[in-house]
Image (cartoon, helix red, strand yellow):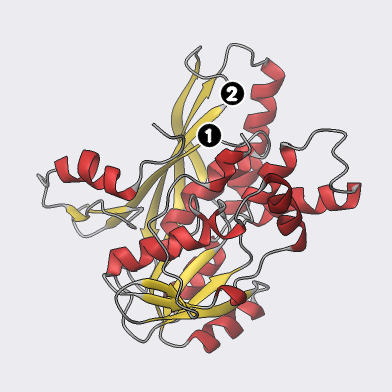
Amino acid sequence: MRTGKLSNEQLDRLILSKLKRNRSEIICSPGIGVDCTAVDLGGDIAVLSCDPITAADSGIGRLTVNVSCNDAAASGAEPIGLMVTFLLPPSVTEDDIDSLMDELMLAADAAGVDIIGGHTEITPSVNRIVTCATVIARPTAAGLIDPKGMQIGNDIVLTKHAGLEGAPLLADKLSADSGLLCPDELAEVRSFLERTSVVKEGLYAAMHGATAMHDVTEGGVFGALWEMSAAAGIGIRFDAANIPVHHITRKLCGYFNIDPYKLISSGCMLIACTDGHALVDGLAALGIDARIIGRAEGDSVITVDGMVIDPPQADEIYKAL
């Protein structure tokens, strides 16, 4: 099978269709475009989500924290704690583990979450460091944001820029003598990892008119648009020209023959809302770049010039691994 996530068709046929609902406490069940579950614990709601980090060579600790917390934020929930698993190859050193844990704790402190458990194991089953984290979160005063809640006529807002996570991962794959990026460009693209959290914009949007949110991970912006549409059963018409792509990201994508709109983009958030202009202005006041890229309408995901967006396939990052 191809590297990366299962296709949505495979996910539905092989995994989701076999799941059963046995407990009345579960108030949000798995589905395409649904990244979190919610559990009613006698009147208190717990939001949970689980994510691995498999493709990174650097920034693994930061991504482990941010990617999991991002899913919770997309449901309008504040992350509280993380359960983290480290699967480490036999080639790992104590210094590697020490550095990974230091980075993880710095990211957790920045996110305001505690590491509350997990598992650490050295195993020949992996040839690089693999992490997996489960986030535990609680809804804000606005309540849960339903990933299926997008409505006809909603504005579609995108924060930051496409390929935000993927660009530094690509930079790590450059040979030392490639000459593609100068030292300043390398430093700038690696700094993108510092912006891979969407907790601030997620919690703000939850309180200011968001009807649905989706953090942009594997499959990139195009994949996230398709999944957001599939969850709600509503089409999206958007203008690809309005999706920002950093010039260094474009340079890296050209070098590796990669589509930046289909490149993993943790740190970007898609937000469906009733008043996109007000939301963009509010996010700008928080120092977060955002723009309206489209509108919820019709029954498919389509660009303004008529190109239909297909279900996401393997992320473009795997072309460079």
Q: Is residue 55 left or right of residue 255?
A: left
Residue 127 lies, in percent from the top left, at 56, 19
Please state which amino acid type lies under the numbered disc 2.
Arg
Q: Residues within 10 Å of mark 2 (few under 14, many from 20)?
A: some
Q: Residues within 10 Å of mark 1 (few under 14, many from 20)?
A: some
Residue 290 lies, in percent from the top left, at 60, 75
Q: Nearer the viewer, residue 100 or 253?
A: 253
Tell me: residue 227, above or below residue 136.
below
Mark carried by residue 242: none
Q: Nearer the viewer, residue 14 or 204?
A: 14
Tell me: residue 246, above or below residue 303.
above
Q: Nearer the viewer, residue 319 or 206?
A: 319
Q: Is residue 12 left or right of residue 183?
A: left
- Which residue is pictured at 49% across the width and 49% down the height? 218
* Residue matched to label 2: 128
Q: From the image, which quarter does the C terminus lie in?
A: top right
Query: Badges 2 and 1: C-beta atoms under 8 Å apart?
Result: yes
Residue 19 seen in the current view: no
* Residue matched to label 1: 54
Residue 112 seen in the current view: yes
For mark 2, give the secondary structure.
Answer: loop
Mark 2 vs mark 1: which is more N-terminal? 1
- Which residue is pictured at 32% across the width and 49% down the height? 8
- Which residue is pictured at 48% across the width and 68% down the height? 270
